[in-house]
Image (cartoon, helix red, strand yellow):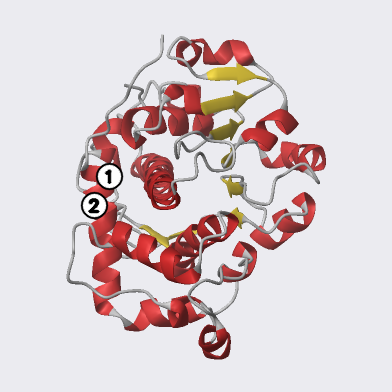
Amino acid sequence: MMNVFSDSSSFSFDAAPTDEFLHLRARAAGLTFCGCAHTVFLCKLAYSLRCSITRHTNRGPLASGGDGDLCVGILGMGHMGKQLLLSLLEKSGIKPSQIKISTRRPESAVEFIQKGVECFFDNRRLAAWADVLFLCCLPSQLPKVCADLHSHLPKHCLVYSFTSGVPVTRLSRLLGHDFILKPQYDFVACDAGDVWLSRTRLTQALTGPLEASCPLAMSGGISLGWNWVCAVLYSLLNICTSASLGSSDALSLINSILKEKRPHTVELNAHSFISASFASSLTAEEPFPWISLTDTQIKKTPLLCFLSSSKPLQQCISAAYKSLLGTPAKLPVTL
């Protein structure tokens, strides 16, 4: 297991740390823990859905993966990239062979290469292969990275950005792509920031009290807008659309994944996702329209209105989050 501060020389000190320093370190640890936990949640949902689509349609592998496998690309192997990779390997159940890395320093990923993760320096190759592409580069590197990827991202590739200081709307313009998810974390007043410092190892935090990072009810001084949760659900809808799945089947599969641990909860329907006029004209065999994930994070969507007013749906999503992160992953390690 990796210590989240192990490669940060700035966290070494001779004198006793001040309260202000501990507060800042708690924030840094909390952002890392929450960022990794939320991506594990997303990947587990996407992987479960892809497997369900493959079984349902019985027509072989989807997009770039085989047998429903989710192909995950990580661009950048700095501190966040390494923590994310560790989380996916230990908690998501995704096989090492389904994860690839593009970095200017492949030698920095030797320990992961030994586990079966492929590492190279070719951003376009990574983007062409990945179903989910995590951007873990510095803000100063982003213009060059986006210029490299522009027009080379398949429509079905979900781009997930950890790069700070760049709004999702600008990122969409730079990439020429609208299937982008960017978490917007905010800090709130709280006396329980030490919930993050009490678990210096990432995998300890991901198996600890999941309420602290649960997207709809976060604690520990960090909050995440509900637009993120809506964007995750819209991304599942787009996965079904890219597989040419009819709207009725898409809703059935998404509901089955969310309701696995709460079988008697509320169900999502077409009106939950799209306008009433469009939902009324959509046939069961017709796929949902492609949804701009960029728009879902900056606009008031039907799903956000539904989620805000439906306590059962909030409970369903929270239960799915705790269940997916609390379920031990079976990790076949390729040597």
Residue drawn at x 49%, y 40% as measured from the top left: 60
Disc number for residue 325: 1
Q: Which residue is mark 2?
A: 322
Q: Dot 2, crowdedness within 10 Å: few (<14), some or many (≥20)?
A: some
Image position of 226 with respect to 325: above or below: below
Residue drawn at x 64%, y 52% as measured from the top left: 165
Q: Dot 1, crowdedness within 10 Å: few (<14), some or many (≥20)?
A: many
Q: Position of residue 234 (x, y in %)?
A: 50, 64
Q: Position of residue 300 (x, y in %)?
A: 54, 80
Disc number for residue 204: none
Q: Position of residue 10 (x, y in %)?
A: 49, 26
Report whether 7 appears left or right of 119. Answer: left
**How many marks on residues?**
2
Q: Secondary structure at mark 2?
A: helix
Labels 2 & 1 near each other (Cβ < 8 A) = yes
Quarter of the C terminus within the rendering:
top left
Image position of 295 with respect to 329: above or below: below
* Residue type at numbered disc 2: Lys
Q: Can residue 329 be spotted in the picture?
A: yes
